[in-house]
Structure formats: C-alpha cells, structure tokens
Image (cartoon, rainbow, N blue to C red):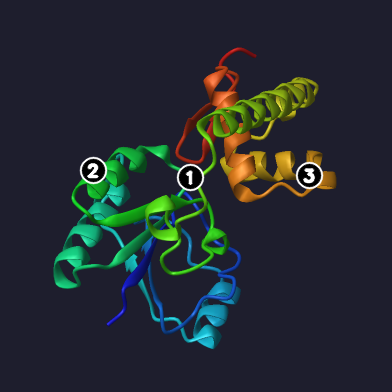
Amino acid sequence: MKTSYILVDFENVQPDSIGSLDAAAFSIIFLVGAKQRNMEIDVVQALKLSGVPFDIQRIEGNGKNALDFHIAYYIGRLSTESPGSVFHIISKDTGFDPLIRHLEKSKVLCRRWSAITDISSPRALHSKTTSPPREPAKRQAKAAAKQKTKISDQAEEMIKNLEKRASAKPARLKTLSGVIKSHFRAISLTSTEVDAIIDELKAQNFIAVDGEKVTYPTT
C-alpha cells in the first residue's frame, strides 16, 4: 500500500511539472476548486507516463478555505486507513502550518512544499526523518541570521524594482513569483527561496496576499 501521499492545493499551486517521482512510492491527489479551469494536458500526460497513481477531486462550493478543509479531511481519512503514511501538501498557503504542527504532535508526518519538484524523497520531511548531522547551536544561529539578512536584502531589492513599475505591478502570486525569479535569474532561486522573499515582502507590509491575489497597501 502507498505510504506517501501528495495533496495538491490546485487553487494555490498549478504545477507545470511533477519531476521524477517514484511510481512505487507516491500517490497524488489534486484538490481542484469548483470553478477552476481544467488541468494542463501536458501535466496529465506526464502523470500517465510516470505511472504515479493520481486522483483529481473537484470540490463543491466556493467558501473561503473550503479546499483547505478538504485537504485536512483526506489527511485524516488516509492516516486512519493507512497508519504510518507520510503526507506532502503542495501549497504556498502558510495557513496549513498550524495543521501540520498539530499532526506532528499526533505522530502524523506531514510537510508543506511550494512545488512537487521540491520533494526529494517519499519521506523527506524534517530532521526526524532525514537525520542530518547536528551543528553547534552558535553555528546554526549564525547561519540563520545570515540567511535572514540575505532574504531581507533581496526583499528590499524587489521593493525598489516593484516600485518602479507603478500600476504595472504583478497582481497574481504566480506572476509575482515569476518576476522575482527573473530578477534574480543569475543565482537561480529555488521555489522555497522565492517564497521566503514573498513572505518578507508580506512581513514588511509591502504586499498583501489573498489566495492568488496580490495587492500593495502602501502604494
């Protein structure tokens, strides 16, 4: 029985690639909004060629967070039907994080990713499953501080870039991610790094994000 499930928040992330998933290790469930467009045929064909089992569930209703509740339902049901399963939520919505922390306390392994291609292995979750070598606390703190400064500097650079665009600022989260990747194309940012810059832009109140919609409160 499959032990690693990928649940895709299709309202938040529309994958253009599934990477090289092990068909024997994964099962994918796409949760699609009631009024969303159909999935790209290239993605469906890639799924069929990969042999990875997948299911597409179109939810009913358009209430706020309706799709999020469906994902929580599937995790609850599958963790009961198949104890020991690992769950990978594909979404940029940080609203899932409290659920993931609660699941962790209940010994259910789950992690949120920004893209399917970010998953390196069926059980790639955190230190409890990957067991990386431990670093001294001071070194970890120094590395974290350096990373935070780097993200802050990149966010400041993006603010200057976006301010120059006046009314032409990206209004969709996917478009904003593309603008950030293009601006920093010389260093090839990962999806996780792009998300960190977006989170910093939100923390500085330069942008506000509601689902896929991006607004600029201070401009």
Residue in the picture at 65% in, 42% down: 177
Residue annotated with mark 2: 102
Nearer to us in this view, 3 or 12? 3
Label 2 CA crowd tier, 10 Å (few <14, some 14–19, many 20+): few
Q: Secondary structure at mark 3?
A: helix
Residue in the picture at 36% in, 38% down: 95
Most extreme residue toward the right is: 186
Q: Position of residue 77 (x, y in %)?
A: 17, 64
Residue annotated with mark 1: 92
Of labels 2 and 1, earlier in sequence is: 1
Residue annotated with mark 3: 182
Q: Is residue 5 left or right of residue 23?
A: left
> Looking at the picture, does residue 25 appear above or below residue 161?
below
Cα–Cα span, label 1 and label 3: 19 Å
Identity, as a three-letter code, of the amino acid under mark 3: Ser
The answer to whether any part of residue 62 appears in the image is no
Label 1 CA crowd tier, 10 Å (few <14, some 14–19, many 20+): many
